Image (spheres, grey):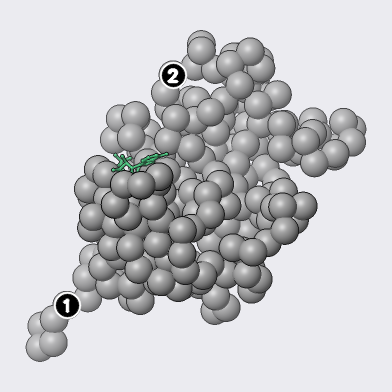
Amino acid sequence: MANIVQFENVGLRYGTSQETLTDVSFTLSSGAFYFLTGASGAGKTSLLRLLYLAQRPTRGNIRLFGEDAVTLPRGRLPGFRRRIGVVFQDFRLVPHLSAFDNIALPLRVSGVPESDVDAPVREMLAWVGLSDRIDAKPPTLSGGEQQRVAIARAVIGRPEILVADEPTGNVDPDMAERLLHLFDSLNRLGTTVVVATHDFHLLGRIQNAHMMRLDKGRLLDPTGSLRFPPPPANGE
Ligand SMILES: Nc1ncnc2c1ncn2[C@@H]1O[C@H](COP(=O)(O)OP(=O)(O)OP(=O)(O)O)[C@@H](O)[C@H]1O
């Protein structure tokens, strides 16, 4: 599988504080599923922000879709960002817009004609099991429902990479399982998926998922070759 993302000796420092990410190097293969784990404050959100181009690194190289993402001219950023769907830790839904209009946003922003918006949005609502909440505004939705709207909005533009930051942080175990199932089905269609979580129960749920572990801003096992559950030791 081709590399879709490549980080090489990436460092990130906010202001004058010590580095939040240090010497982070890894590659993501197109079509694979990755969990990013690590304690609170380890740098998971920061790494994801570099990945979806919300932040530039202080040092190091990042290649995305085979191109140098660090020196990418500003004008090309929106085009790159459209290829990456993001599910934010705090959802970031627009509170005064309905579920339908929240999910439709990426299509409308990229200029899709209104006649081509209705069908895919309804399809996404059905996919996340929210067809009956089409007109509901985010404040009237439960945490799990808001999260599903956020997932639908992140994937409606058929991104090549889906990044989700603690997507199961605010939902019960049943809903966490459902959300993971959505990510899994998307991955089976070929989307590269990266899910940051410290919910260890999730890790065994996706067959052949790769695990990346951050510890105080450093990536352990940077080859991304660790699988969960780990393969049996020799002789077992
Ligand atoms: N915009 C910022 N300005 C300054 N420091 C920041 C900023 N964002 C994050 N940090 C710091 O960087 C470190 C890593 O934060 P980050 O949110 O990336 O960790 P995390 O692993 O995602 O944590 P959590 O699991 O709690 O969300 C923390 O010490 C945090 O305070």
Which sits in the foreground, 126 or 117? 117
Q: Is mark 1 on a helix, strand or loop?
A: loop
Q: Name the residue under label 2.
A: 142
When the figure is inspected, residue 167 is found, relative to residue 203, above or below; the finding is above
Which amino acid, by three-letter code, is at mark 2? Ser
Residue 18, image x, y percentages: 29, 52
Q: Which structural element holds mark 2?
A: loop
Q: Residue furthest front?
A: 16
**To which quarter of the image does residue 95 belong?**
top right
The answer to which quarter of the image holds residue 12 is bottom left
Residue at 49% across / 30% down in the picture?
91
Residue 84 in the image: above or below residue 127: below
What quarter of the picture does the N terminus occupy?
bottom right
Ligand 1 sits in which quadrant? top left
List x then y, in percent, for residue 190: 59, 63
Q: Quadrant of the C terminus?
A: bottom left
Please name the residue shown 57% across and 78% down the image.
Answer: 2
Say the numbered circle drawn on residue 232. 1
- Spot the residue most to the bottom: 235
